[in-house]
Image (tube, rainbow, N blue to C red):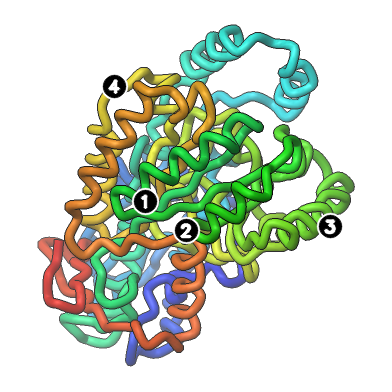
């Protein structure tokens, strides 16, 4: 299944190549449904197909049963044993979950938990979350904290375009404005009334280090209008965090339809254009109906949330007309509370890897007590921001600015658009994305 709008061409935006790659003769599907295919540590969820033409096998994928499917290179083509756009759509829509054997809570179990959550002491909740982590385990796919599946798929797509056109290089619309190597955004989910007050303290810290961020507020507590005015006047963004802090928005179609007008009203009242679902609960197709410009609910890779998963993309993408800004770093609660890290090293290492791939570095945190409201956790976050100040040619943006840029890039109408290049690498299917100034990772 290829989801409309989720095509690799729309991600790469190649310049001066045909819109349609010619179909391959002699192709037949091996399976009726998509399955997990593997090439080393790279996993793809797609419908296998057999390539009956001649050619040189330059790589191969392995099915669960051990059978092998080659990637073939002919004069004028590189062909994979699956449709590349289908694989991309299955990544970002998280349809790959249908082929995963990883443990996860059922919808009924999640609903039961949220019915009694308020009566459970915080310490007991944390013990339960850690027990859940041990029970679920850390899956081999998507890899955590970073899975390069979409990046490698994009390289394979670019390689097929180069082979088709007989080129050694390919021009494309660069990922970020002004030729920046990567983008960096900060967003915060405010969980309660105390977090509203602490949001200003967190804004003070970020502003002192030259950053601005988005604060997402919910409807289940009072928000001081003065806090909203102060944050807005200082260049911070106000976003939405839902009507109730539970999974009710996506619990049923009827409930979703009931809450969307409430979200629209809340967005108008707050002046918000962005959203993240409480606890990142989601049904992918419904995200397109949110009354916002962008969403930040889908993780890049997060096995630690009550709804684990990941889109495996370090770049934004479209869900209908909504721009999805996946969060690409571990959340503060995961890193600092559940896993007990005491330094920002994992954040920094992951950010460096995303920058090397020219992606979006998106850090999600919370100003509340037990999160960055605690001094020890705030110190780790402060060190992280201090180190991020030193990143050369990384675009520091508000989430709404990143979403609007991605929309303008899609339309090709922004004066900050620049041209990057895709160049050959050490292997036919491993390429380099070269920034407009000529620098490649």
Residue occupied by mark 4: 342
- Say few, some or many: other residues with alpha carbon within 10 Å of mark 2 (under 14 / 14 to 19 / 20 or more): few
Kindly identify the residue that appears in the image at 49 percent across and 28 percent down. 304
Sequence order check: which comes first, mark 2 or mark 1? 1
Q: Nearer the viewer, residue 49 or 156?
A: 156
Residue occupied by mark 1: 207
- Say few, some or many: other residues with alpha carbon within 10 Å of mark 4 (under 14 / 14 to 19 / 20 or more): some
Circle nearer the viewer, 4 or 1:
1
Q: Nearer the viewer, residue 382 or 351?
A: 382
- Quarter where residue 432 is shown: bottom left
Kindly identify the residue that appears in the image at 73 percent across and 18 percent down. 118
Q: Position of residue 204 (x, y in %)?
A: 40, 44
Q: Are marks 3 and 4 in contact (CB under 8 Å)?
A: no
Residue occupied by mark 2: 234
Helix, strand or loop for disc 2: loop
User: Residues under labels 2 and 3: Cα distance?
Assistant: 29 Å
Circle nearer the viewer, 2 or 4:
2
Helix, strand or loop for disc 3: helix
In this orientation, does residue 28 appear?
no
Q: Are marks 2 and 1 in contact (CB under 8 Å)?
A: yes
User: Residues under labels 2 and 1: Cα distance?
Assistant: 9 Å
Sequence order check: which comes first, mark 3 or mark 1? 1
Total numbered badges shown on the rendered structure: 4
Q: Which mark is residue 261?
A: 3
User: Residues under labels 3 and 1: Cα distance?
Assistant: 34 Å
């Amino acid at each position: 299944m290829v989801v409309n709008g989720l095509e690799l061409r729309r991600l790469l935006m190649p310049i001066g190549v045909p819109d349609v790659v010619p179909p391959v003769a002699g192709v037949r599907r091996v399976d009726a449904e998509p399955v997990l295919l593997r090439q080393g540590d790279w996993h793809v969820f797609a419908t296998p197909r057999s390539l009956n033409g001649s050619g040189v096998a330059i790589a191969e994928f392995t099915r669960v049963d051990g059978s092998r499917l080659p990637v073939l290179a002919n004069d004028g083509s590189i062909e994979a044993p699956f449709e590349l756009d289908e694989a991309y759509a299955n990544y970002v829509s998280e349809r790959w979950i249908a082929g995963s054997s990883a443990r996860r809570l059922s919808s009924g179990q999640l609903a039961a938990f949220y019915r009694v959550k308020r009566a459970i002491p915080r310490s007991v909740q944390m013990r339960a979350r850690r027990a859940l982590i041990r029970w679920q385990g850390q899956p081999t796919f998507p890899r955590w904290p970073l899975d390069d599946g979409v990046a490698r798929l994009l390289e394979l797509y670019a390689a097929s375009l180069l082979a088709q056109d007989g080129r050694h290089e390919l021009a494309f619309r660069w990922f970020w404005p002004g030729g920046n190597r990567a983008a960096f955004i900060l967003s915060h989910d405010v969980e309660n009334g105390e977090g509203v007050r602490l949001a200003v303290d967190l804004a003070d810290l970020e502003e002192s280090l030259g950053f601005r961020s988005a604060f997402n507020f919910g409807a289940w507590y009072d928000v001081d209008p003065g806090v909203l005015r102060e944050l807005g006047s200082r260049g911070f963004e106000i976003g939405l965090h839902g009507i109730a802090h539970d999974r009710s928005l996506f619990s049923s179609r009827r409930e979703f339809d009931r809450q969307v007008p409430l979200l629209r009203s809340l967005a108008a009242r707050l002046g918000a254009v962005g959203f993240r679902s409480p606890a990142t609960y989601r049904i992918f197709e419904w995200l397109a109906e949110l009354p916002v410009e962008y969403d930040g609910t889908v993780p890049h890779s997060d096995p630690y949330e009550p709804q684990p998963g990941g889109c495996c993309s370090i770049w934004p993408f479209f869900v209908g007309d909504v721009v999805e800004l996946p969060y690409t770093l571990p959340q503060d609660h995961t890193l600092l509370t559940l896993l007990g890290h005491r330094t920002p090293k994992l954040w920094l290492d992951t950010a460096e890897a995303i920058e090397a791939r020219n992606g979006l570095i998106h850090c999600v945190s919370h100003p509340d007590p037990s999160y960055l409201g605690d001094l020890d956790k705030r110190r780790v976050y402060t060190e992280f921001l201090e180190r991020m100040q030193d990143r050369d040619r990384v675009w520091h943006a508000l989430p709404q600015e990143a979403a609007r840029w991605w929309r303008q890039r899609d339309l090709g109408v922004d004066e900050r658009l620049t041209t990057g290049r895709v160049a050959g690498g050490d292997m036919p299917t491993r390429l380099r994305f070269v920034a407009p100034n000529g620098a490649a990772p």
